[in-house]
Amino acid sequence: MFIESAADFDVRDYLRKEMMPHFLCPGCGHGIALRALLWAIHELGLDKDKLAVVSGIGCAGRLSAYIDANTFHVTHGRPLAYATGLALARPDLHVVVITGDGDCLAIGGNHLIHACRRNLKLTCLMLNNEIYGMTGGQVSPTTSETRLTTTTPLGNQEPHFDACALATAAGASFVGREVTHHVPKLKELIKAGLDHPGFAFVEILSDCTEIFGRKNDMGNSTEMIMNQKSAIRPSAYRDTVDTPFRPNDLSTGILARNDRPEYGAAYRRAAAARAGAS
Amino acid sequence: MNAVDTALTGKNAVKLISGNHACALGAIAAGCRFFAGYPITPSSEIAERLARHLPEVDGVFVQMEDEIASMAAVIGASMGGVKAMTATSGPGFSLKQENIGYAAGAEIPCVIVNVMRGGPSTGMPTRPSQADLMQARWGSHGDYPIIALTPASVGEIYSETIRAFDLAEQCRSPVVLLYDQVIAQLSETVVLNNAANSSRTERKWASGPRAVYKPYDSGSDAIPAMAKPGDGYRTHTTGLTHSESGFPTQNPEAVTRNLSRLFSKLERHRDLIDSSEMLHCDDADVVIVAIGISARAARRAVELCRAQGLRVGLFRPITFWPFPEKQLCQAAAKACAVLVPEMNTGQLRLVVERVLGGTPVEGIHLFSGEAITPADIAARAAALARGT
């Protein structure tokens, strides 16, 4: 079914061809994530003129420039805050945020938790490659313990964030995670996020071969992606298999979902009710 | 009928309101339909008023998680085509600088109110100051132009808030409204003359075919037409240095061309932007230069000096940045001395010294959290006029 639906999808319909070639390193997973997003947009039939993509700083932040839509490349860590203003002022637009692990969880951490709590309709894709790639490979809030980076020459001693657990605890009404190995599943997850009426947080495990993998002897891009794949345990298996066929336990798929009231609609309803009462 | 109804129906109404209240009503009259803020003394009344009134006019108010986010949300709303404002005081103004730089560089219209309180750091939250004049001009990193207005009464806060939105739209620039805590929380009667003051000024919107539209094309007036999301232009906006196409570039010629246009943009529209007041400057031996509540005190000091037969005048910048250099030179053309009373250690004096060159400039600098009195200014101005 996934293959059939791919037949009428041409990624070039959604890219700014004048921006090619892109600047991502060979082996980087971000291009796969971008393709999955554009595929999801295609399948949902979203109008490019009504699509706004807001991105922050870093490798993930640069992706917005490649998308043929209304795109905004803003300041470091702030794309959710910019997107909040845009989506509140223009509820007719479909607003997507593309951010990275450093952008979203370190400098932008405060905006993330409050966006989760507020539940304004936004789709936030966090591309997690465990590293500040653009600036040369510094430790990030999701860098695994003991990993070597340019700022952890002794190996990382800080525990890493579980972004999905954080988003869930902060009240996000849709939380999901996927690896770039599973492109059709990733596309389906992003589609579900785009379709969700409230705030949707989607973590995409991406690989940084050049800046992170190389330093940690993690192999080439294929090996890194296969290792990510073997580290996961899809949430769909959780209730069906006592002893899974693989021992790892990083949950993927839709991890949390509820139908809390969407903030923008709730605000407009309250305003209308007040106007009617006076 | 509440104050907002009056402000929107075009009928004159005389109201006794505070400066912050006047700012909120001015914003609504100017067409502001989005406010994002964060609580901070002594500006919170602006947010509180707009939280109540914006939904009445189909606008949106949101209290964000911090000052940085509120500035970002304002820019986001304006990128969506809605007139937007935030309000804060010194510590919040510091935090907003990051995104004010983005608004300046990407040329997104927005209004930032800074009710000045004592500093540095947390300073004196409930006490007035005029110490953010330089921060308003140079607060964010890199070179960029910006507009800052310094009203001196509650009525002028109302009219200058409207003008701030007009200038933001016309020049595609962030505009800072700077006033001290005294006039923010002072109550005065104001004529809410909406018929005369209300604004339908909007930025120049992109029109014509997408194929030939360039988001940062200089056009005839150095102010590019902006594409509204949803209108089919599908443009890219970035804080990176960009070419006319809006996409990032490090091409030296393209960088120079775009930044040169940015810097020339306000200079080319000084007729629109400049605003100042001269009082008895024609024959003045001593010209006082002051803004905000200090200018109110200076006005009385001029009267006191004139009553003694002393030729003392007042020059008051209403647009503070870009500074009205020509007008100051004209005002002080015959002056033997210039006196600058201000609630800081010499920020306005520094500008006046630069502009006037050889003319002796003296300051009265009060940073105790108190306002400067007319008597203090009159005594010093009289001494200067007598040459003592």
Image (spheres, coloured by chain):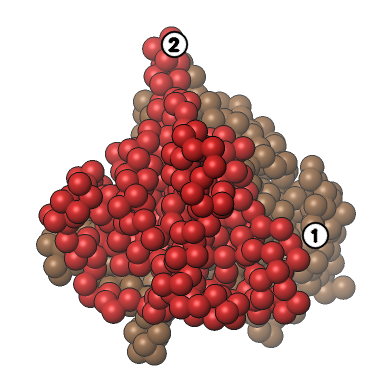
Chain colours: A red, B brown
The residue indicated by pointer 2 is A278
Please say whether residue B25 is visible from this viewpoint. Answer: no
The image quadrant where one finds the C terminus of chain A is top left
Estimate the x, y position of residue B40 in percent, counting from the top left.
70, 42
Location of residue B284 (image quadrant): bottom right
Disc 2: which chain?
A
The residue indicated by pointer 1 is B120
Estimate the x, y position of residue A232 in percent, counting from the top left.
50, 53
- B189 in relation to B233, above or below: above
- B119 in relation to B243, above or below: above
Estimate the x, y position of residue B294 in percent, counting from the top left.
72, 53
Give the residue at x 31% y 67%.
A66
Per the model, the C-alpha gap separating discs 2 and 1 is 45 Å
Closer-to-camera residue (B217/B168): B217
Give the residue at x 34% y 49%.
A185
Crowd class of label 1 (few under 14; some 14 to 19; many from 20; radius 10 Å): few
Give the residue at x 72% y 79%.
A153
Disc 1: which chain?
B
Crowd class of label 2 (few under 14; some 14 to 19; many from 20; radius 10 Å): few
- B175 in relation to B241, above or below: above
Question: In the rendered structure, which amino acid carries the disc numbered 1?
Answer: Pro
